[in-house]
Amino acid sequence: MDNMESVLIIPDTHGQTFWRKAVSNSKAEKIIFLGDFVDPYETIAWYEVFRRLSDIIQFKREQRERVTLLWGNHDLAYLHLSPRGSRYDFKAADSYLSLLMETRDCFQMADEVTIGDKRFLFSHAGVNRKWILANEKVFGGLEVNAVLLNDLDNHNFIEALSNVSSRRGGVCEAGSMIWADCHEFENPDSDIPGYIQIFGHTRQSNSGIWHNSRQTAYCLDCGKAFRLDTSGIFEAK
């Protein structure tokens, strides 16, 4: 992707509407939603969550080149029916499935941008190099980038996406790009060379940004929007 000056990042919404004020105030060239649009933490009627997701999809359709919607584990649980995470809503399942199937072309697995001299890779939970190596039959030693991740749409990739580490109650060494815990990126062997990664998924109780010591991985799941530019990552007002 061509070099950009700024990106607006919308972490996991889970039925919340904080994104609306952020996008209305933003002049960013790119707006990236990090996935997990459904299964709210607080009590919100499923049909209201459905309507709010529909609004996000409509926003994408109106500004298709500017807006990116990434798949989250909660969203894909309804599309593929497995694995089902916490707060899975059986009452809403059929409606969510129909909507996501109908608008599947509006979503993707990853995106990347260049700002200044830095390359940023966006996904829902982060792409861990140990997960890539554990699924060599899927990735085949190919260079990992957003194009590759978006082109992988087969049964083996669905299996790989189901990988969950012990940090999330699973048995795999590393979680997938929709299941990894942010703390799985603390060690250097998790890095994807050449990229700074930005993702959500791991809820931050302090309502702030988590990053590893190398500043190669940032988790923004705290119910706020963020602006990324050459100066760094800042809360969007």
Image (spheres, helix red, strand yellow):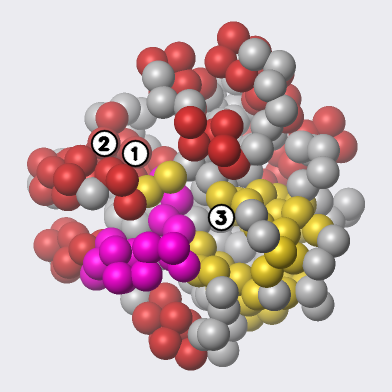
4 within the magenta span: no
Q: Please state the extent of the stretch shown in magenta in the rendering.
A: 55-72
Q: Earlier in the sequence, mark 3 or mark 2?
A: 2
Name the residue furthest top.
Answer: 137
Q: Quadrant of the N terminus?
A: bottom right
Circle 2: residue type: Leu
Residue 61 lies in what quarter of the image? Answer: bottom left
CB atoms at circles 1 and 2 under 8 Å apart? yes
Quadrant of the drawing holding the C terminus: bottom right
User: Which one is in front, 88 or 77?
Assistant: 77
Q: Which residue is mark 2?
A: 79
Mark toward the viewer: 3 or 2: 2
Judged left or right of residue 79, residue 221 is right
- Choose top left, top right, bottom left or bottom right for residue 83: top left
- Say which residue label 1 marks: 76
Q: State yes or no: residue 66 in magenta.
A: yes
Q: Is residue 190 above or below residue 66?
A: above
Residue that numbered label 3 is attached to: 200
The answer to whether residue 210 shows anywhere in this view is no
Q: Is residue 188 left or right of residue 223?
A: right
Q: What percent of the width, then of the height, locates residue 47?
A: 12, 62
User: For the residues marked 1 and 2, what is the alpha-carbon distance in whole angstroms?
Assistant: 5 Å
The residue positioned 37% from the left and 81% from the top of the image is 20
Q: CA distance from mark 3 to mark 1?
A: 15 Å
Q: Is residue 52 left or right of residue 92?
A: right
* Residue displayed at 20% across by 41% down: 101
Residue under the image location 37 percent in, 63 percent down:
64
Q: CA distance from mark 3 to mark 2?
A: 20 Å
Q: Residue at x 17, y 45 (%)?
A: 102
